[in-house]
Image (tube, rainbow, N blue to C red):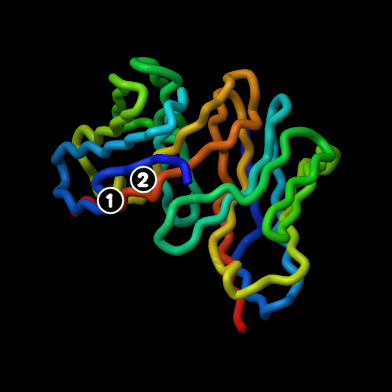
Amino acid sequence: DAGITQSPRHKVTETGTPVTLRCHQTENHRYMYWYRQDPGHGLRLIHYSYGVKDTDKGEVSDGYSVSRSKTEDFLLTLESATSSQTSVYFCAISESQASYSGNTIYFGEGSWLTVV
Amino acid sequence: GNSVTQMEGPVTLSEEAFLTINCTYTATGYPSLFWYVQYPGEGLQLLLKATKADDKGSNKGFEATYRKETTSFHLEKGSVQVSDSAVYFCALSGANSKLTFGKGITLSVRP
């Protein structure tokens, strides 16, 4: 199994509060990703990082920000949580060469977030 | 943009039945194609992949062939087991290995 740890694994928070999810990897992979999983939508990319301090938006980035100050850590912040952000959040990593689409992407165990 | 379409579910089969899960895609360039599996309460695990046209990915008795002419990557298994019960996702990889997923399909295998 790829060394990916997500924290917290479960969280209930109130509408309007900020929330930070952490992804920690021990593989020294360059690429890290945050996806959310919702019924009827599969998984959708929120943000990704291609190196320390290098990040970019994905398909559903509104209301989320990310930071990567170290290779091993990728943080996802919900600036002001809303009920529509209730979801399961997955971190993923890839050793990735940017020009090659066949790199395997490894997923963490997920973080269940409920916004009430 | 890229997109992946999976057949509607859920699917319920008896043990030892033949399985086919359809997946078609739309993409620019030359994507790689993947099948991921998710067991209850867990993250996604790579089941198999194919990186170019006519490649066949295989693992644990599952197979899928990258068909560029029909833009398809259908998943098959000759004889399913109860332990194959899970959610299956088809996905394609574009620039920077960003994955585009289908909606997923739940497979239940009864003894």
Q: Which residue is mark 2?
A: A89
The residue marked by circle 2 belongs to what chain? A
Query: How many numbered circles does the render carry?
Result: 2
Q: Quadrant of the C terminus of chain A?
A: bottom left
Q: Which residue is mark 1?
A: A9
Q: In the rendering, at what x and y percent does residue B3 appear?
A: 62, 39
Of residues B107 and B71, the one drawn nearer to the viewer in this rendering = B107
**Residue A24 falls in which quadrant of the image?**
top left
**Residue A51 falls in which quadrant of the image?**
top left
Q: Which mark is residue A96?
A: none
Q: Pointer 1 and pointer 2: residues touching (CB < 8 Å)?
A: no
Amino acid type of the residue that numbered disc 1 sits on in the rendered structure: Arg
**Mark 1 or mark 2: which comes first in sequence?**
1
Q: In the rendering, at what x and y percent does residue B67 appear?
A: 82, 42
- Determine whether, in the image, residue B103 is placed left or right of residue A88: right
* 1 or 2: mark nearer the eye: 1
Of residues B105 and B37, the one drawn nearer to the viewer in this rendering = B37
At 57% from the left and 69% from the top, the residue drawn is B85
Q: Is residue A5 above or below residue B105?
A: above
Q: In the rendering, at what x and y percent does residue B99 appear?
A: 55, 36
Estimate the spatial distance between the alpha carbons at disc 1 and disc 2, rounded to whole Å. Answer: 9 Å
Q: Residues within 10 Å of mark 2 (few under 14, many from 20)?
A: many
At 39% from the left and 16% from the top, the residue drawn is A54
Q: In the rendering, at what x and y percent does residue A84 appear?
A: 30, 47
Element marked by disc 1: loop
Q: List the single residue furthest toward the top.
A: A53
Of residues B79 and B69, the one drawn nearer to the viewer in this rendering = B79
Q: List the single residue furthest toward the bottom.
A: B111
Q: Residues within 10 Å of mark 1 (few under 14, many from 20)?
A: some
